[in-house]
Amino acid sequence: MRHVAVKDKRWDDHYTRLARRERYPARSVYKLQEIQKRFAVIRRGNRILDLGCAPGSWLMYAAEITGSTGCVAGVDLTPVTISLPAHVSVHTLDIFELVEDPAAVFAQEFDVVLSDMAPATTGSRGVDAARSYNLCEAALAVARQVLRPGGAFVCKIFQGEDFKSFTAAVQTAFSECKIFKPQSCRKASKEIYLIGKGKTGGPHVRS
Ligand SMILES: C[S@@+](CC[C@H](N)C(=O)[O-])C[C@H]1O[C@@H](n2cnc3c(N)ncnc32)[C@H](O)[C@@H]1O
């Protein structure tokens, strides 16, 4: 029991307490807030797709910005149990199923695709980074299919040996690509975010 209490205290930082006070289900909301303050990716009336959306703090925050003239759709392996406004919908799905044919699930184009997906961690940095890269590749493939031309993409990746090639892929698909580490990321974490703006070309058709 003592071990659990010590561990909980270690993870219960400023952002965790703030999230509890502000009634967000996860501290990760402050990462998206920092990204939004710096890059203004989400606008009122936008259609947002949030990949890896559970437990739902990015859904809540994105929905506050879009307002009810926009909409937010979330996808996660895990069901989202919090109550959400009517302009938010959630699909309990594996990204690797979605990537085959996103148009079968979403009849519309999106202005922004967000991905905060993370694999279950193993303790091996190399394995975790490789799994994160697989999720990022799937997120980018979905973004290329569902984003309108000019749309934006935000994607978390665990830095590892595939980081450079994933950055190059985002640079190819978007006219602008930035790399950003929010202050609210835990210091020990290897996670970092890529922000692609200005999706180039028309909808991507998978062969
Ligand atoms: C860090 S959490 C996201 C937190 C979320 N942004 C929030 O603010 O509430 C990462 C999520 O990625 C999801 N995930 C991992 N692999 C996935 C996959 N193959 N398909 C869909 N979601 C996945 C996990 O289930 C987990 O809920």
Image (spheres, helix red, strand yellow):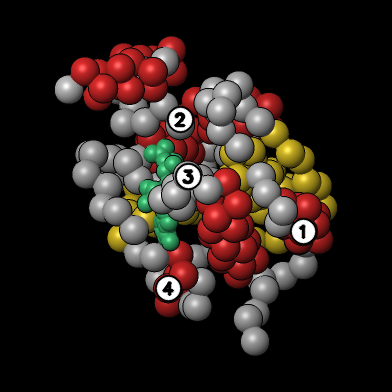
Q: x, y (%) of residue 165?
A: 77, 58
Instruction: Give residue 165's mark.
Output: 1
Helix, strand or loop under label 4 = helix
Mark 3 nearby-residue class (10 Å; few <14, some 14–19, many ≥20) = few
**Label 3 sits on what residue type?**
Gly
| Residue that sits furthest to the bottom in the current view | 207
Q: Residue at x 56, y 33 (%)?
A: 189
Question: Between residues 193 and 102, which one lies in front from this camera angle?
Answer: 193
Disc 2/disc 4 C-alpha distance (Å): 26 Å
**Is the CB of the residue bearing disc 4 within 8 angstroms of ligand 1?**
no
Disc 1/disc 2 C-alpha distance (Å): 27 Å
**Label 2 sits on what residue type?**
Val
| Proximity of marks 4 and 1: CB atoms separated by less than 8 Å | no
**Label 1 sits on what residue type?**
Ser
Q: x, y (%) of residue 39?
A: 69, 33
Marks 4 and 3, the one that precedes in the sequence = 4
Q: Mark 3 points at which residue?
A: 123
Q: Mark 2 points at which residue?
A: 29
The answer to whether residue 115 is above or below residue 25 is below
Taking the image as shown, residue 171 lies to the left or right of residue 104, namely right
Question: Between residues 164 and 34, which one lies in front from this camera angle?
Answer: 164
Mark whose residue sits in front, 3 or 1 = 3
Instruction: Give residue 97's mark.
Output: 4
Marks 3 and 2, the one that precedes in the sequence = 2
Marks 1 and 2, the one that precedes in the sequence = 2
Marks 4 and 1, the one that precedes in the sequence = 4
Question: Between residues 148 and 26, which one lies in front from this camera angle?
Answer: 26
**Label 4 sits on what residue type?**
Glu
**Is the CB of the residue bearing disc 2 within 8 angstroms of ligand 1?**
yes
Q: Which residue is drawn at 77% across and 67% down?
A: 201
Q: Residue at x 53, y 37 (%)?
A: 44
